[in-house]
Image (cartoon, rainbow, N blue to C red):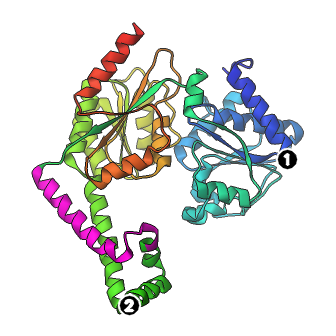
Amino acid sequence: MINQTSDRTLKQKSDIDKWISSGARGYFEWCTGSGKSYLACLAIKLCNERHPDKQINVVVPTTVLQEAWIDDKKGHIKVHGLKNVNVFVINTYVKETHDCALLIIDEVHTATGAKSKHFNTVIDRTKYNWILCLSATLEKEHVNFLHKKGIGCISKLTADEAVNNGWLSPYRILCVPIELGDEDREKYDKMHKEFNKHFATFNFDFEFAMKCVTNKDARQELATKLGWQVNRIDAAVFNWNRNMRLRKEFLYHIETKIDAAIEVTKVLGMQTILFGQSIKGADKINTALGDKCVEYHSKITAKTLKDNLKKLRDGRTKVDYISSAKGLEAGFDLPNLQLGITWSRTSKALRATQTLGRILRKVEGKTAYFIELYVPETQDENWLKKSLIGQKNVLWCNSIDQISQIIESDKQKLV
């Protein structure tokens, strides 16, 4: 039940009043676990009161989030007595045009910006009177997209503000180095050297190199500048892009990091969610952790995915771990999760924020830990540092052994 007089609820109601004052048009950038969904429910209740016969569309990126709305026992629609609400997954929503009184876009970063491809047509495909957008983290391109649509910021709430307010559990991010074996180190160094050889053609300018991948005029411009034939630039583009892809795939599948993730999970014994970028790695972790683990990725049927989440949520089963390949980076809610582990990553700050948010739900007495496993002196370390820009409570460890020492020390401080 929602405590209607709590500080958080009063802020949510106050901020919805600000949204109404802004013409019922705007976005909220609130950290995961802080109450974004209830903001949406408050907006829907207002629409139900003022326009009782009008349709409300909620657009979400995943079936997990859709289920959180439509579940006939615990879904937001049932719990809050909402009316006239249709909940769509974004990939089906953009196939048609729509008409509604209120459009709510959850995880709006998936529906904004040039990189969202056809998903960024959600707003244009909808005739609406009111619009409310929600996200834990918006990057510059997302904000610019929304501003061009006349959708401004109503309020922001960071994870640290929510922790200080007592709305989320305190947390630590532990960055733990995992060394490559001699053979893998030699392989990586050779691959990285080859990548840089071709990268030099573009003066080590990543944005320009990417432009040359897709833009024929940019390749011609570079050929003229260097006094080269265009086919030589074409070859450099191909080899640079190919080696970048090979390096990325190598870093996504490092066995020593996967083994370390398994070891840490077993040793700590907390309810844990593990994130990676490959299904093969997620499968290996699931197998190694046995019947205490379930997995979640795109190669598993929808029914099995739903059953796996149910097993993890059900305190009567022995399942304490879930191994995911990208699929649960957003929208998965389980308050008792105390440990998150990333064993392969991208450089996106959005990914780091979303995955951290999975373990921050408030439980009395809980301190949450997020372990970022990385390979030092590789692009993996660069990606990690870039993804953590702006994050607080980050501790760079010397070894995997330090994890238990830090957690035990935190426990002693609470005694």
Q: Distance between the residues labelled 1 and 2?
A: 53 Å
List the single residue furthest toward the right. 50
Judged by its main secondary structure, the magenta piece is helix
In the structure shown, which secondary structural element does the residue marked by tag 2 occupy? helix
**Left or right: 403 as drawn, with respect to 349:** left
In the structure shown, which secondary structural element does the residue marked by tag 1 occupy? loop
Query: As shown in the figure, which amino acid type bears the numbered disc 2?
Result: Val
Image coords of residue 360 (percent x, y): 49, 29
Query: As shown in the figure, which amino acid type bears the numbered disc 1?
Result: Gly
Question: Would you call the spot at circle 2 few (<14 residues within 10 Å), some (14-19), or many (20 or more)?
Answer: some
Rendered image: mark on residue 23 = 1
Q: Residue at x 54, y 63 (%)?
A: 115
Please state, as top left, top right, bottom left or bottom right, where the N terminus lies in the image.
top right
Q: Nearer the viewer, residue 105 or 180?
A: 180
Question: Would you call the spot at circle 1 few (<14 residues within 10 Å), some (14-19), or many (20 or more)?
Answer: few
**Left or right: 79 as drawn, with respect to 291:** right
53 part of magenta stretch: no
**Left or right: 198 as drawn, with respect to 55:** left
Image coords of residue 37 (percent x, y): 65, 36
Label located before the other in sequence (1 or 2) = 1
Q: Nearer the viewer, residue 22 or 232?
A: 232
Rendered image: mark on residue 230 = 2
Question: Magenta span covers which residues?
Answer: 182-208
Image coords of residue 109 (percent x, y): 59, 52
